[in-house]
Amino acid sequence: MGEIRDWRPFVYGGVASITAEFGTFPIDTTKTRLQIQGQKIDQSFAELRYRGMTDAFIKISKQEGINALYSGIWPAVLRQATYGTIKFGTYYTLKKVATERGWLLDKAGNENLWCNAGCATVAGAVSSAIANPTDVLKVRMQVSGKGTNNAGLVRCFKEIYVHEGVRGLWRGVGPTAQRAAVIAAVELPVYDFCKLHLMETFGDQVANHFISSFIASLGSAVASTPIDVIRTRLMNQRRVHQLQLHNPGGGGGGVGTATVPPSSVTPPSASSPSSVGSGHHHKFYTGSLDCAIQTVRNEGFRALYKGFVPTWVRMGPWNIIFFITYEQLKQMY
């Protein structure tokens, strides 16, 4: 029975994460759209289409339909089934091990903040790295919306695999793990801290879980949004194919450069004329640091906080739904 009980945090974490995801996913879609717009380096997303979360919500609904707000929901559910399950199960398991070895609690019974944060950081980083492919699929489908060639989960997966290989599914894994580690290191210890100190006032009841989760969400939103912007842009970045085309009729050297997505490139046949001078793959951002530097340089520091409002608005309800569901499951079983 003890072994079965050890698995309960994993099951509770997965079920609670999926429940919270369904309830808040449209807000996440508006956040993603806001984060990828205004990239001066990428003409596909240079236009500022949305003025804010509410404007994005209204325009997406009107122009693409309500269903577009749920584009990417299934990879998001798959992500929570893996990421949420591993993250919360690992966190509470590590806390249990740390308690048994005398690392977590002092003589007065208070939790050591650094030990708690360490457990959360490890749990967040490991679980997010494992679940990264589902995150890439979610972001791509959210950006594309409904009614596009990338609308289906299987089709989106196939396109990434064909054009970008297995590595494409782990695009942005660095900032993803960093973001998850930051969120977990702030969110989980803050929740446990608030819950413990509100126990005398509210007891182990829904009101305590509600307030504690809302406070935890604010801290994690402030800490994680810059990393989230970088992560989203790296994940949405497709490998771009640059062709240098010879233009014999043009003056001044006669070489032009066209930049097109990989899906629209038709490889020249062996018998085709040598009008194609050369071709190579190009990426707008070479990594997390490059993306951060170029974002700030081209759009200003505030660009790192694009989507902050929907991030917090989503994190608040998400954490509230998650922790209340999690706590109720603990009490039921």
Image (tube, rainbow, N blue to C red):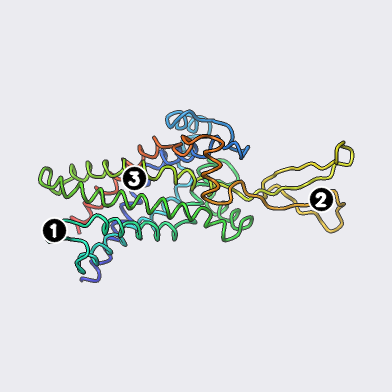
* Residue topped by disc 2: 277
Q: Describe the element under mark 2 as helix, strand or loop.
A: strand
Q: In the rendered image, which quarter contains the N terminus? A: bottom left
Marks 1 and 2 sit apart, C-alpha to C-alpha, by 71 Å
Q: Nearer the viewer, mark 1 or mark 3?
A: 1
Task: Specify whether 86 is left or right of 242.
Answer: left
* Residue topped by disc 1: 109
Q: Nearer the viewer, residue 326 or 280?
A: 280
* Residue topped by disc 3: 220
Q: In the rendered image, which quarter contains the C terminus? A: bottom left
Q: Nearer the viewer, mark 1 or mark 2?
A: 1
Residue 262, position as x, y percentages in the image: 67, 50
First in residue order: circle 1 vs circle 2: 1
Task: Specify whether 152 is left or right of 101.
Answer: right
Q: Nearer the viewer, residue 192 or 103?
A: 103
Which residue shows up at 55% across the image and 47% down it? 290
Residue 18, position as x, y percentages in the image: 36, 51
Q: Nearer the viewer, residue 163 or 118?
A: 118
Task: Specify whether 306 is left or right of 105.
Answer: right
Q: Which mark is residue 295?
A: none
Which residue shows up at 70% across the image and 43% down it? 259
Amino acid residing under circle 3: Ser
First in residue order: circle 1 vs circle 3: 1
Amino acid residing under circle 2: Gly
Q: Describe the element under mark 3 as helix, strand or loop.
A: helix
Q: Are marks 3 and 2 in contact (CB under 8 Å)?
A: no
Marks 3 and 2 sit apart, C-alpha to C-alpha, by 50 Å
